[in-house]
Amino acid sequence: MRHYPLYLIALFTLWGCSAPSINEYTLLTTQTVYQDKAPLSTKSLSVALSKSVASLSGKNIIYLHENGGTGAYLYSRWSDTPSIMLQRSLLTSLYEQRLFASLSPSTSIAKSDWMLESDLDAFTHRISNDKSDGYIDVTYRLIDTQSKRQIASKRFVVSNPSTSADATGGINALKSSEHELNRQCIAWLKTIVKEIK
């Protein structure tokens, strides 16, 4: 009986060593050559965190089967919530494009002329019998912060094929979809800026 605590300690030590590790992943923007040029717009823009459905409010990497069943990968997760990663990634891409005079997250105390709000409805690895993809569904709204008026809004539905129906395949497909989402969003914002100038 005297050795019972020692057995427990040894058992927990062995169990802790044999437990599988959890891998964390993040979204990174593709590297572009930064050019020191004048911004396309004299406006300042703040980018808000996306409002998302409950299943996307954590760090789980979500998969969706064609029958509607969802789940989260056990040993893989995001480094942040999808909303935080998408905000950070878009801000970086916008900064590299020199589209606005200044950029900031909406949590900054700096005042901005415009704010980009969004609703994130899907950020999942969709799996069917013969294929899978990284699927993002987000709606952006550009708001004039002075008048509180909506300038424009657009829904973006982006998907990219996955090379495998596992966590690694889903992560890589979602990264590709995120790059494409940024490209499309920036093209949309450029069109608005040129129309308002």
Image (spheres, helix red, strand yellow):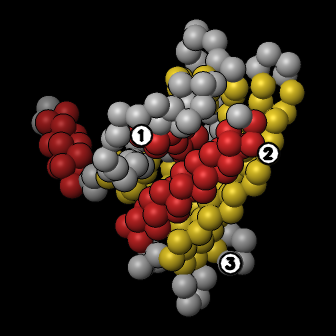
Q: Secondary structure at mark 1?
A: helix
Residue found 19% across the figure and 33% down from its top: 5
Quadrant where the C terminus is found in the figure: top right
Between marks 2 and 3, how big is the CA–CA gap? 29 Å
Of the residues shown, which amino acid type is indicated by label 3? Answer: Glu
For the question of whether residue 53 can be seen, the reply is no
Quadrant where the N terminus is found in the figure: top left
Of the residues shown, which amino acid type is indicated by label 1? Answer: Glu
* Pair 1/2: label in front: 1
| Of callouts 2 and 3, the N-terminal one | 3
Q: Residues within 10 Å of mark 2 (few under 14, many from 20)?
A: some
**Relative depth, front residue between 51 and 101:** 101
For the question of whether residue 148 can be seen, the reply is yes
Between marks 1 and 2, how big is the CA–CA gap? 23 Å
Residue found 41% across the figure and 71% down from its top: 169
Residue 93 x, y percent position in the rendering: 46, 43
* Pair 3/1: label in front: 1
Location of mark 3 (residue): 66
Location of mark 1 (residue): 96
Location of mark 2 (residue): 153
